[in-house]
């Protein structure tokens, strides 16, 4: 089963997209901020796809992607 990581500061969006993806047969991981997501990546979470909101307080979506790409497991 493929795992999709959802990052959004809206709980409604996270729940809605997570439910849609679960019905389609995907596992999901969720984070409500860029900081929370980055901590999960640094802890070694393994995913197949990242879907992130761009406009979030703190670390926004673009900054999150840049930081994740610095990690050896997600460099490419």
Image: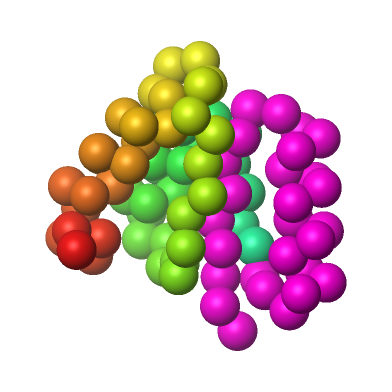
Q: Tell me where residue 27 appears, x and y as whole percent.
A: 66, 71
Residue 69 against residue 19 in the figure, above or below? above
| Residue located 61% across and 57% down the image | 29
| Residue located 80% across and 46% down the image | 15
Scheme of image coloration: rainbow
Q: In the picture, residue 73 is in which quadrant? A: bottom left
Which of the two residues, 67 or 16, is positioned nearer the viewer here? 16
Residue sticking out furthest to the bottom:
1
Which of the two residues, 30 or 50, is positioned nearer the viewer here? 50
| Residue located 44% across and 16% down the image | 58
Judge whether residue 21 is colored magenta.
yes
In the image: residue 69, left or right of residue 29: left
Residue 37 against residue 44 in the figure, above or below? above
Q: Tell me where residue 39 appears, x and y as whole percent.
A: 40, 42
| Residue located 33% across and 41% down the image | 65
Q: Tell me where residue 64 appears, x and y as whole percent.
A: 35, 36
Q: In the picture, residue 12 is in which quadrant? A: top right
> Is the N terminus in the top left, top right, bottom left or bottom right quadrant?
bottom right
> Is the C terminus in the top left, top right, bottom left or bottom right quadrant?
bottom left
Q: Tell me where residue 11 appears, x and y as whole percent.
A: 76, 33
In the image: residue 23, left or right of residue 28: right
The span shown in magenta is 1-27
């Amino acid at each position: 089963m493929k795992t999709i990581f959802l990052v959004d500061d809206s709980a409604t969006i996270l729940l809605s997209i997570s439910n849609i993806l679960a019905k389609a047969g995907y596992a999901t991981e969720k984070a409500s901020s860029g900081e929370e997501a980055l901590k999960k990546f640094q802890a070694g979470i393994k995913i197949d796809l990242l879907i992130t909101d761009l406009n979030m307080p703190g670390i926004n979506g673009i900054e999150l992607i840049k930081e994740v790409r610095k990690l050896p497991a997600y460099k490419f």
